[in-house]
Image (spheres, rainbow, N blue to C red):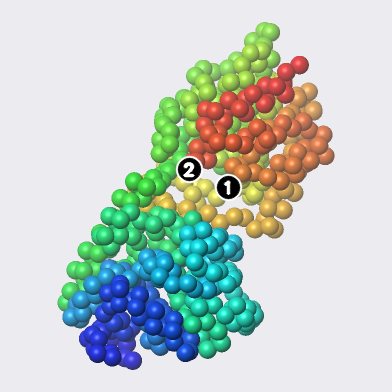
């Protein structure tokens, strides 16, 4: 079929439109269910596909995919974009035939054996459990995840054939699911094979459906974008691209500009309401450059940390510590502790008086030298340059398992200081105004950047950490200072705390592991990930008990 904008045709007596080269017939929801019933009674395997704007975009760009869709026995319209494009060709599609709605309707009307193929490992299994709970008449014939290498495909096809399902649901996403069905249909041994996209993610609880209002206005993609920010190109850029291709030449620029603006504005609004982002972690002007530590806190700074979950004032004294006053020599009769670490030690998520460092209290005089973002090599450099002058009896090293291990690999952290502001390295200056004010931008940025470190880098981090702890222990012993490592867990931390404790034992260093005490609700802010007042209080209790004579 010729690739094109669209044309009105007839197929088997029913009107149809060609949308970006894909032929879609007019069917109501009831007619679609009846057509599925006919296919399930057929004497040969049949294929069913749903086409939305992103599917049509892929078909426009890929001749083989377009041909596979047009070989489908039943091709149904999904989404407002396809309905709009069909209307421009003179075809009014009555209902939005979304698979997330249509498949449950089908399962309530028939007793079927169903096989689920798709999703990440474990998702299809949880979706199968959902099926058994909510559709007791359905028999689950089997399931398998959708991360298939081509060499493993024949094995999975044979497993499906032996299961002999009535209905095979394939949730691999476009175009993988349609191409899988198209090349294997005759060997699958099922009556109907249907491409269902993210249906298993909904059934397994990984995705939530949009509100009826958003669905009624054709804006369900906004809800999906909030939950799957890595797909921002598909929605924010793909929807205008679809309209560009479906429109006449004279209307294209105006339509695309309008649709792109509305898409961005709508996505920004939904993200701000449903998933507000941390736009800037640190107040402007908090930091100054440092030749040895990359950055340091500005003496005598006053500012506010503003986050979706909390707003806290921050006061930096003339010595660069989070405190109201400067410190001289230790007071007579008081034993001085110097707490070094990162943002968990500084405690910017709560007011100064509620940080775990400040809660330690008498008989200790505790100085808070925590600096947000610091890793162990920066803390060691600060002690050498400034810390020993405070003449501490004890040094508490707050070690955060979430990133200190991998950060210790680097001679520099992946951040840059620009005009007194600390930002992620690699952010282009031209984007800074958007980065500072757009929740949507931050959501997409974190989805792209938030990949875990590889095993090789993590292992190198452990080696670097061991060397740094040895150096710090040596310097403390030289000065007669007691060193205690406070092991600070990430949420859900398991395993690394034990390895860190063992590392401290080998270095002859005391360690306090906060992991057992920092389990349970209400201890971490859900989005920011730092401790609440309750979390700080729990950490202080553990450290105070350890310090007690």
Q: Is residue 311 left or right of residue 425?
A: left
Q: Which of the 4 image quadrants contains residue 481?
A: top right
Residue placed at 28% from the left, 62% from the top?
218
Residue 410 rendering spot, x and y as whole percentages:
64, 50
Residue 129 visible in the current orientation: yes
* Observer-nearest of 50 and 509: 50
Q: Quadrant of the N terminus?
A: bottom left
Crowd class of label 1 (few under 14; some 14 to 19; many from 20; radius 10 Å): some
Mark 1 lies on residue: 413
Q: Residue 351 placed where, x, y %?
A: 48, 25
Tell me the residue at 54%/77% (across/down). Answer: 165
The residue indicated by pointer 2 is 527
Q: Helix or strand or loop: what does disc 1 sit on?
A: loop
Determine whether the residue tagged by mark 2 lies in a helix, strand or loop. loop
- Residue 419, position as x, y percentages in the image: 42, 42
- Residue at screen point 39% across, 83% down: 38
**What is the x, y in percent for residue 26?**
26, 80
Q: Nearer the viewer, mark 2 or mark 1?
A: 2
Q: Nearer the viewer, residue 155 or 6?
A: 155
Q: Residue at image x 71%, y 41%?
A: 497
The answer to whether one can see residue 170 in this image is no
Disc with the residue nearer the chain's start (2 vs 1):
1
Numbered badge on residue 215? none
Q: Could you tell whether 400 is left or right of 245 in the image?
A: right
């Amino acid at each position: 079929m010729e690739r094109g904008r669209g044309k009105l045709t007839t197929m088997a007596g029913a009107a149809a439109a060609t949308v970006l080269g894909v032929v879609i017939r007019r069917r109501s929801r009831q007619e679609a269910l009846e057509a599925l019933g006919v296919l399930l009674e057929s004497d040969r395997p049949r294929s069913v596909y749903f086409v939305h704007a992103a599917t049509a975009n892929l078909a426009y760009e890929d001749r083989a995919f377009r041909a596979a869709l047009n070989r489908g026995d039943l091709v149904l319209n999904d989404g407002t974009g396809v309905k709009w494009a069909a209307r421009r060709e003179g075809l009014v599609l009555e209902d939005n035939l979304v698979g997330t709605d249509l498949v449950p309707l089908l399962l309530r009307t028939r007793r079927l054996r169903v096989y689920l193929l798709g999703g990440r490992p474990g998702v299809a299994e949880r979706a199968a459990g959902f099926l058994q709970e909510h559709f007791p008449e359905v028999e689950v014939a089997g399931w398998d995840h959708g991360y298939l290498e081509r060499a493993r495909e024949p094995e999975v096809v044979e497993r499906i054939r032996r299961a002999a399902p009535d209905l095979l649901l394939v949730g691999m996403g476009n175009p993988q699911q349609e191409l899988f069905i198209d090349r294997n249909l005759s060997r699958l041994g099922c009556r109907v094979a249907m491409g269902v996209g993210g249906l298993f993610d909904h059934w397994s609880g990984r995705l939530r459906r949009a509100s009826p209002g958003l669905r009624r206005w054709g804006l369900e993609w906004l809800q999906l974008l909030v939950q799957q920010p890595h797909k921002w190109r598909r929605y924010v850029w793909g929807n205008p691209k679809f309209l560009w291709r479906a429109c006449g030449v004279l209307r294209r620029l105006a339509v695309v500009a309008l649709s792109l603006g509305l898409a961005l504005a709508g996505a920004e609004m939904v993200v701000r309401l449903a998933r507000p982002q941390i736009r800037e972690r640190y107040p402007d002007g908090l930091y100054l450059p440092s030749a040895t530590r990359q950055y340091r806190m500005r003496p005598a700074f006053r500012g506010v940390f503003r986050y979706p979950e909390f707003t806290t004032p921050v006061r930096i004294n003339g010595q660069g510590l989070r405190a109201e006053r400067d410190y001289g020599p230790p007071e007579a009769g008081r034993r001085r502790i110097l707490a070094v670490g990162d943002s968990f030690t500084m405690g910017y998520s709560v007011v100064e008086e509620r940080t775990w460092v400040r809660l330690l209290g008498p008989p200790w005089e505790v100085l808070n030298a925590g600096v947000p973002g610091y890793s162990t090599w920066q803390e060691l450099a600060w002690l050498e340059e400034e810390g020993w002058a405070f003449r501490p009896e004890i040094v508490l090293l707050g070690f955060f398992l979430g990133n200190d291990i991998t950060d210790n690999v680097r001679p520099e952290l992946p951040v840059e200081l620009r005009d007194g502001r600390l930002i992620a390295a690699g952010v282009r200056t031209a984007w800074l105004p958007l980065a500072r004010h757009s929740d949507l931008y931050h959501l997409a940025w974190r989805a792209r950047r938030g990949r875990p470190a590889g095993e090789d880098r993590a292992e190198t981090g452990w080696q670097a950490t061991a060397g740094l702890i040895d150096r710090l222990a040596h310097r403390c012993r030289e000065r007669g200072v007691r060193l205690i490592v406070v092991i600070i867990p990430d949420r859900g931390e398991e395993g690394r705390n034990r390895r860190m404790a063992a590392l401290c034992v080998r270095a002859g260093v005391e360690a306090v592991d906060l992991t057992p005490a920092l389990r349970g609700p209400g201890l971490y802010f859900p989005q920011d990930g730092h401790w609440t007042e309750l979390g700080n209080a729990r950490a202080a209790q553990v450290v105070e008990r350890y310090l007690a004579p």
